[in-house]
C-alpha cells in the first residue's frame, strides 16, 4: 500500500513505519520535526533495509501537503502528527488547538481533494475523561477531558465522525491508545522527548542513567492497591502492530473505534520495581503531591480489537522496561 504517515519520525510513528516498511508498503512521512529528529529516517533504513520518503513538512502548510499528495497519491493516511504534552497544553491552549485541530483540518481537506478517504487517527484513552469504572470499553461515554490536549483528541474524534456521517465513502479508524512505553529491540528508535520528560518511563530511564536525580511519584493516596496511579502500559511495538491490523478494516467505510491496550493495570511503583528487576538498575524516587488532572486508574478492555482485528498485545512488562533502558543507553 502507499501510505502517508504524518508524524512518522515521532515515537509511535517511527515504530509503525518500521513494520510498514518491513511488510513492503511504500511509506511517505511528513513531519515538521518539532518533536523529533530527521536522523530517525536513517535509523528506519538501518533497521529495515528500506528507506521511507521523507518530507520535513508542517501539515498546516496546505501547499506543501498538496504537493506531497500530488506526487504520491497515498491510498491511506496514518495520522500521528500532533502536540502531546498534557501540562504544556494547559499553559499553551491556543498552540495546541491551532496545531492539532488546524493541522488535521488541512490534512482532511487535502485528502478529500485527492480522493483519499481512509484515515487512521491517533486518539487516546484521555477521551474517556474520568471513567465510571475500569476496564474501559469503547462504548463508554467520552468527554470530561481535563486538559486542552485531551480536548483536541475529543474534538478531532467528533470532526472525523461528522465527516464520515456526511460522506459515507470515508473510512475512519479511531485508535484510543493507552500508555505506550518501550522501544524497538534494536535500540535505534524510542521515546526521545526534548527537555524534561512528562511521561513516566522516559523519566525513569533518565533517572536510571543519572541524567535526572530522582523520580517524583505523583501521589500515593489514590484509591488503588498501593496508592499510586494505575495505567495500562503497552509496548510500543504492539501498539504499532495495531495500526497494521486495522488497515484492512478501512476497506469497509464507516467509523471503527478500538482501544489499544493490554487490559492489565500497573501502578507507578509496579513500574519502578519492574524496571529495577528487569535491568538491575536502581531508580531513586520520592513521593510528591498528586499531579493536577491525573486520574486514579485507567486500563482498557482490549477485546474488541482482538475479536475484530485479530490483534492482541503480546509483549511483557519486562520487555517494555528492558527495551526502554536499551534505547536510553544507546543514545549519545
Ligand atoms: P511524538 O511527539 O513523538 O510524535 C508526534 C510527531 O508529530 C513528532 O515527530 C512531531 O514533530 C510531529 N508533529 C507535530 N505537529 C506537527 C505538524 N503540525 N506538522 C507535522 N508534524 C508535526 O508523539 P507520539 O508519542 O509518537 O504520539 C503520536 C500521536 O499519538 C500523537 O497524536 C499523540 O497525541 C498520540 N498519543 C500519544 C500517546 C503517548 O502516550 N505517547 C498516547 C495517546 C495518544
Ligand atoms: N507519573 C509519576 N511521575 C512522573 C510521571 C508520571 O508518578 O514523573 C505517574 C502519573 O501520575 C501517572 C502515571 O505515572 O499515574 C503515568 O503518567 P504518564 O504521564 O506517563 O501518562 P498519563 O497516563 O498521564 O498520560 C499518557 C499520555 C497521554 C495519553 C494517556 C492515555 O501522556 O497523552 O497516557 O492514557 F492521553
Image (cartoon, grey):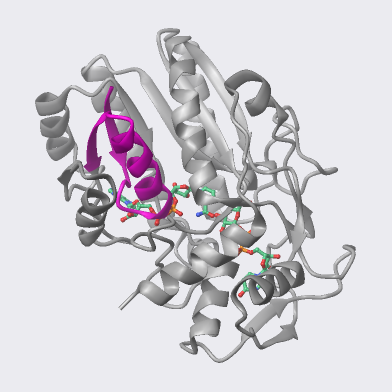
The magenta stretch spans residue 114: no
Q: What stretch is highlighted in magenta?
A: 1-29
Relative to residue 37, is residue 79 drawn left or right? right
For the N terminus, the quadrant is top left
Instruction: Using the image as rendered, state which of residue 170 and residue 224 is in the foreground.
Output: 224
Residue drawn at x 40%, y 26% as measured from the top left? 119
Residue drawn at x 54%, y 19% as measured from the top left? 255
Where does residue 325 sit, x and y in percent of width and height? 50, 71
Relative to residue 104, is residue 39 drawn left or right? left
Where does residue 107 sit, x and y in percent of width and height? 29, 33
Image quarter for ligand 2 equals bottom right
Relative to residue 288, is residue 6 drawn left or right? left
Relative to residue 296, is residue 23 drawn left or right? left
Instruction: Using the image as rendered, state which of residue 306 and residue 106 is in the foreground.
Output: 306
Residue drawn at x 68%, y 74% as measured from the top left? 277
Residue drawn at x 48%, y 37% as measured from the top left? 241
Which of the 4 quarters of the picture holds residue 53? top left
| Rendered view: 155 above or below 13 | above
For the C terminus, the quadrant is bottom left
Where does residue 194 sit, x and y in percent of width and height? 37, 71
Residue 106 in view (yes/no)? no
| Rendered view: 102 above or below 199 | above
Where does residue 90 sit, x and y in percent of width and height? 53, 64
Residue 249 in view (yes/no)? yes
Instruction: Using the image as rendered, state which of residue 29 and residue 34 is in the foreground.
Output: 29
| Rendered view: 84 above or below 300 | below
Amino acid at each position: 500500500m502507499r501510505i502517508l504517515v504524518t508524524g512518522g519520525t515521532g515515537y509511535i510513528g517511527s515504530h509503525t513505519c518500521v513494520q510498514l516498511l518491513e511488510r513492503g508498503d511504500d511509506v511517505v512521512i511528513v513531519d515538521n520535526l518539532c518533536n523529533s529528529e530527521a536522523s530517525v529516517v536513517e535509523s528506519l533504513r538501518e533497521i529495515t533495509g528500506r528507506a521511507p520518503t521523507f518530507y520535513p513538512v508542517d501539515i498546516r502548510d496546505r501547499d506543501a501537503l498538496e504537493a506531497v499528495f500530488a506526487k504520491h497519491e497515498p491510498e491511506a493516511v496514518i495520522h500521528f502528527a500532533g502536540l502531546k504534552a498534557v501540562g504544556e497544553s494547559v499553559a499553551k491552549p491556543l498552540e495546541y488547538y491551532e496545531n492539532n485541530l488546524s493541522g488535521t483540518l488541512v490534512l482532511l481537506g487535502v485528502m478529500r481533494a485527492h480522493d483519499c478517504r481512509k484515515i487512521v487517527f491517533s486518539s487516546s484513552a484521555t477521551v474517556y475523561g474520568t471513567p465510571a469504572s475500569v476496564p474501559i470499553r469503547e462504548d463508554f461515554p467520552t468527554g470530561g477531558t481535563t486538559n486542552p490536549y485531551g480536548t483536541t483528541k475529543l474534538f478531532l474524534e467528533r470532526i472525523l465522525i461528522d465527516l464520515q456521517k456526511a460522506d459515507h465513502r470515508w473510512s475512519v479508524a479511531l485508535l484510543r491508545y493507552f500508555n505506550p512505553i518501550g522501544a524497538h529491540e534494536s535500540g535505534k528508535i524510542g521515546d526521545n522527548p526534548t527537555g524534561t520528560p512528562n511521561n513516566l518511563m522516559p523519566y525513569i530511564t533518565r533517572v536510571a542513567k543519572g541524567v535526572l536525580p530522582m523520580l517524583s511519584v505523583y501521589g500515593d493516596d489514590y484509591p488503588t492497591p498501593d496508592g499510586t496511579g494505575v495505567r495500562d502500559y503497552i509496548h510500543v511495538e504492539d501498539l504499532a502492530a495495531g495500526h497494521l491490523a486495522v488497515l484492512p478494516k478501512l476497506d469497509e467505510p464507516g467509523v471503527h473505534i478500538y482501544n489499544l491496550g493490554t487490559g492489565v493495570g500497573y501502578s507507578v511503583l509496579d513500574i519502578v520495581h519492574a524496571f529495577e528487576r528487569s535491568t538491575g538498575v536502581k531508580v531513586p524516587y520520592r513521593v510528591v503531591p498528586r499531579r493536577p488532572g491525573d486520574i486514579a486508574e485507567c486500563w482498557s478492555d482490549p477485546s474488541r480489537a482482538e475479536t475484530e482485528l485479530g490483534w492482541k498485545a503480546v509483549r511483557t512488562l519486562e520487555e517494555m522496561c528492558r527495551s526502554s533502558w536499551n534505547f536510553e543507553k544507546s543514545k549519545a
